Image: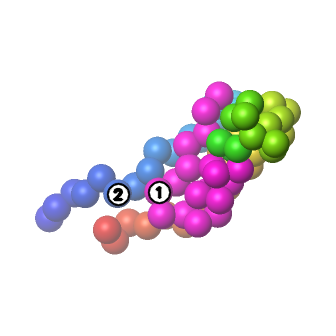
Amino acid sequence: MRLTGMSGPVFLSTSVPRTPVPVDGCAVCAALWQQYRDATDPRRAEFCRSRATDIAVEISRHPHPKRTNR
Ligand SMILES: [Zn+2]
């Protein structure tokens, strides 16, 4: 039996992490992460700290089915 570290970190607490952690391989998380980076980059037109917080919450709350077979 081999154990591979393909599963992402799991946040079970209700608190919002300052920096969201997108789940590897999740297209939705990847898209949200891109928006988060835009919203946190002062040089971007999309720069907005409150929006960045909203996106961070969205990423942290995005549900993922458990993948145990890899
Ligand atoms: Zn996701």
State the count of labels.
2
Closer-to-camera residue (54/47):
47
Q: Which residue is mark 2?
A: 6
Q: Which residue is pictured at 52% across the width and 54% down the height?
A: 23
Residue 21 drawn in magenta = yes
Q: Which residue is pictured at 65% across the width and 28% down the height?
A: 18
Q: Which residue is pictured at 59% across the width and 58% down the height?
A: 30
Mark 1, residues whose alpha carbon is within 10 Å: few (<14), some, or many (≥20)? few
The reply to whether residue 3 is in sight is yes
Amino acid type, residue under disc 1 in the picture: Asp
Mark 2, residues whose alpha carbon is within 10 Å: few (<14), some, or many (≥20)? few
Q: Earlier in the sequence, mark 2 or mark 1?
A: 2
- Seen in the image, is 69 located left or right of residue 49? left
Q: Which residue is mark 1?
A: 24
Residue 15, how many percent across, how many down?
Answer: 69, 31
Q: Which residue is pictured at 74% across the width and 31% down the height?
A: 42
CA distance for labels 2 and 1:
8 Å
Q: Quadrant of residue 60?
A: top right
The mark found on residue 63 in the picture is: none
Which segment did they paint magenta? 18-35
Q: Can you say whether 59 is above or below 68 in the image?
A: above
Residue 16, how many percent across, how many down?
Answer: 69, 33
Residue 5 drawn in magenta = no
The reply to whether residue 54 is in sight is no
**Mark 1 secondary-structure assignment:** loop
- Seen in the image, is 44 located left or right of residue 22? right
Q: Can you say whether 42 is above or below 57 in the image?
A: above
